[in-house]
Every structure is written in C-alpha cells, then in structure tokens.
Image (cartoon, grey):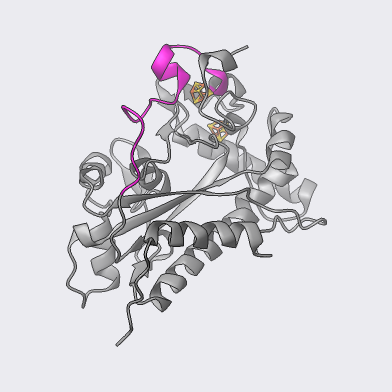
Amino acid sequence: MKTIKHFENSESWLETIVRSFINKSPENSLRNEKNEKAWADPVVGFSSGNDPLYQFYKEDIGAFYWTPLEIFKNTFPWLEVTADQLTVVSWVLPQTEATKSDNREQTFYPSERWARSRIYGEEVNDKLRKHVVKTLLESGREAVAPLLAPHYETKTSKRYDFASTWSERHAAYTSGLGTFGICDGLITPRGKAMRCGSVIAHIKIPPTKRLYKDHHAHCLFFSKGICRKCVQRCPAGAITERGHDKVKCEKHLEITEEYVKSHFGFEGYGCGLCQTGVPCESKIPTQNDIE
Ligand code: SF4
Ligand code: SF4
C-alpha cells in the first residue's frame, strides 16, 4: 500500500509543481530554432469536486459531460470516494510576449510562433498533465487528467455544437481563473491569449475564490456594452454579438492547415486572432483599454 505523504500546504505544493515544470523544464519549448519557451509563468486555481457548477455543466452541455466524480470513478472503480474528497487542479498557460506580439500583426493566418504553440505548446500541456498526475500518484494521491483519460471524447451538444466530455476552460472558470468573453475564450488575470489544463486529484484543497459575479464579468461587451474588438479581428466572421459560431471557426482552422504546412514546415493549424490585439489579450480589460 502506498504511503500518503502529508503536506502542510497542498495548495502551494501543487502550484509549485505546475509553475516549476513550465518555468524550469526544457520540455517547455516551441521547438523552433532558438528553442524558445512555449508558455510564460502559469496561474493555478482549485475547485472542489462537489462544486454544484460541475453538475450544472452536465445539465447545460449534455448528459455525456463528466462530473469530477464520474471521471474519477471511471478511472479508479475500486476506490470508495465522494465528490467532496476530490479537487480539480486547474492551470492557465499564458502565451509569451513574443508569440502574442507576432500574432497581433496577423490579419488572416496565424504567426509561426502561434501555430507552434497550438501544436507543440499543447504537447507541453499534455506533458504537464502527466507530470502532475505522476507527482500526485508518487505522493499516494490518486489523480487523473480528464483530457488524457481513455474515455475522453469529443461530442455534439444540442445547445453548443462541438463539445467534449470535459472542458478545461469550464474547469478554469470554476477554479476562479477567469470568465468567458463573447468569443468563448476565457479572460484570465493574464488575459485570454492562453491555454489551460486540469487534473482531478484525491486530495482536499480549499477552493480558489471566484472573484467575479457571473461567467461573463470580465468581457467589456457583456459588462459595459462596449469593445467588440474580437468581432472585428475574426477573419471568419465567427464572432457576433450573439456569440461564437464554432462551425465557422472550425472551418477557418481547416483553411490554415495548408498555410502552416507550406509556410512553417510542420503539420499544424491555428488562428487566435480573437485572442491577440484585443483589450483582453493579456489582462482583465477596463474601459480605459478601449482606444
Ligand atoms: S475583445 Fe472585447 S468584446 Fe471581445 S472578449 Fe475581449 S473584452 Fe470581450
Ligand atoms: S480562433 Fe480565429 S476563426 Fe476562431 S473565432 Fe477566433 S478569430 Fe475567429
């Protein structure tokens, strides 16, 4: 039987695991000539496995959507656990200044750094998911990364078109890391130019406070009726005041595949124009950020 190690402050222990991996590991690479970092210093948040929002997502998105307890029981069917004994560890990986700066200049296709972060950066995110799970297991805490779980699937939601059995952005929202913009991106304290990840662990950690009043609080369009910069930036007309058209967005991403291959020499795609060159790119925007 494994020995469970006790940590005085599990919260800062897990935050250090995530931040050290991204800030110190050579795995954090765009795999370009200069071997530049794919991600800047992460932000980490926590939510309880029995946060009622997880049940709400299941009801809102579709019955296929997992609660933390469901994915945990799928992975460890022999364990007797209750939802309140689980914590969702969620992180935000901000794009680097160099990547954001390149993509700001783009008007249709992604910059090379952005396309690299979409492919190689997401591979780094997968390595981070595995690293966090492994470290927890070694400490005697069962853990699973939903996106790497064998039963993880993409699905079609009646209300939201493309969906999946777990959403990293919804986990981040629940874990106090940000709110949704009109384009569906999550506006975090480091902005919307980021990717996120999560692991569900058999450990109790106090949830991070959600310092917002609703799921759109950080978006200037929803909070003040202004901005719409992401609407103007989208080359596919996929963002309107009614929200984000995932089908149009997906079609545009397909168009970028050929461009990425012929211009940058690897199999990839990307866009992120709605995440760069906008007031919420690197921070929670205020009215003063509108020119
Ligand atoms: S660019 Fe403006 S309208 Fe679009 S998500 Fe950001 S704050 Fe909201
Ligand atoms: S990723 Fe590109 S195509 Fe999709 S909504 Fe954003 S700007 Fe539009």
Dividing the picture into quadrants, the one containing residue 56 is top left
Query: Considering the image in quadrants, where does the N terminus appear?
Result: bottom left
Q: Which of 165 and 47 is in front in this view?
A: 47
Visible in this render: residue 239? yes
- Apparent side of residue 213 relative to residue 52 in the rendered image (left or right): right
Dividing the picture into quadrants, the one containing residue 26 is bottom right
Q: Nearer the viewer, residue 99 or 135?
A: 135
- Apparent side of residue 35 relative to residue 209 in the rendered image (left or right): right
Q: Residue 170, how many percent across, how many down?
A: 36, 43
Visible in this render: residue 123? no
Give the answer, above or below, for where 175 lies relative to 139. Answer: above
Tell me which secondary structure the magenta stretch mostly adopts.
loop
Give the answer, above or below, for where 75 lies relative to 3. Answer: above
Give the answer, above or below, for where 167 lies relative to 14. Answer: above
Q: Residue 135, how many percent across, how many down?
A: 46, 72
Q: Residue furthest right?
A: 33
- Apparent side of residue 15 relative to residue 70 in the rendered image (left or right): right
Q: Nearer the viewer, residue 16 or 102?
A: 16
- The span shown in magenta is 207-230
Magenta includes 96?
no
**Residue at position x 43%, y 11% in the image:** 225
Dividing the picture into quadrants, the one containing residue 35 is bottom right
Query: Considering the image in quadrants, where does the C terminus appear?
Result: top right
Q: Residue 122, how many percent across, how many down?
A: 57, 55
Magenta includes 215?
yes
Total numbered labels: 0
Q: Which of 238 and 9 is in front in this view?
A: 9
**Residue at position x 52%, y 14% in the image:** 287
Q: Residue 137, how many percent across, how many down?
A: 39, 75
